[in-house]
Amino acid sequence: PTPGALVPYGGSVAGEGEVRSAPTTQSNWRAGHAAAEPPRSNSAASNRSPSATERLKQRLKQREGGSGATPVARLGRTMAAGGGAGADDWKERIEARRREAEMEQVADLQHKEMIAERSGRRNDAMRRVMERQAMRQQEVGGLEE
């Protein structure tokens, strides 16, 4: 090729004025890699391994077979196996929560009473200040006359 002339990728010229460019390279590349890659269709994947739904069904069957078909059946086995002592734990937790709620209500009431008492004292103090100011105003008015 002459200096400054276009040289196609790979250095080959197809014919007079015709230049081979990326499409042939790309198609060669695709042809070379297409054989190496496995097909990606769903039918090919399902032949190799079970679907997600099937795997989930298998796990559910294993769970049911190992620990009972229903939560009630599992609870019955737990109670029969000596788990009855833990059955009253929920009652204790509920009772503790109830006591805590009562204590919180009592504390809230005491806090509100304390705030109301402070507010009343503050209001009384402000009333006395206002009364004193009014008396001084009257005294000043009496002296000016």
Image: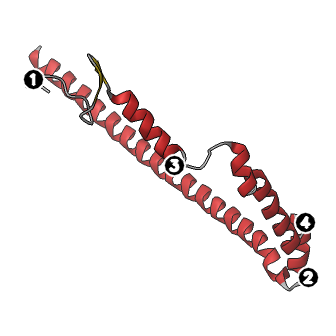
Instruction: Between label 4 and label 2, give the one nearer the viewer.
Output: 4
Q: Of marks 1 and 4, which one's residue comes earlier in the chain?
A: 1
In x, y percent, where is residue 32?
Answer: 47, 44
Q: Are marks 4 and 3 in contact (CB under 8 Å)?
A: no
Q: Quadrant of residue 141?
A: top left
- Answer with left or right where residue 96 lies relative to residue 83: left
Q: Quadrant of residue 71?
A: bottom right
Instruction: Between label 1 and label 4, give the one nearer the viewer.
Output: 1
Quadrant where the N terminus sits is top left
Crowd class of label 1 (few under 14; some 14 to 19; many from 20; radius 10 Å): few
Instruction: Between label 4 and label 3, give the one nearer the viewer.
Output: 4
Q: What residue is rendered at 91% in x and 74% in y?
A: 76
Q: What kind of residue is marked 2?
A: Ala
Instruction: Tell me the tag on residue 69.
Output: 4
Helix, strand or loop under label 4: loop
Q: Of marks 4 and 2, which one's residue comes earlier in the chain?
A: 4
Q: What kind of residue is marked 4?
A: Ala
Q: What residue is rendered at 18% in x and 23% in y?
A: 6
Q: What kind of residue is marked 1?
A: Gly
Instruction: Tell me the tag on residue 80.
Output: 2
Q: Quadrant of residue 107?
A: bottom right
**Of 74 and 3, which appears nearest the observer?**
3
In x, y percent, where is residue 4?
Answer: 9, 23
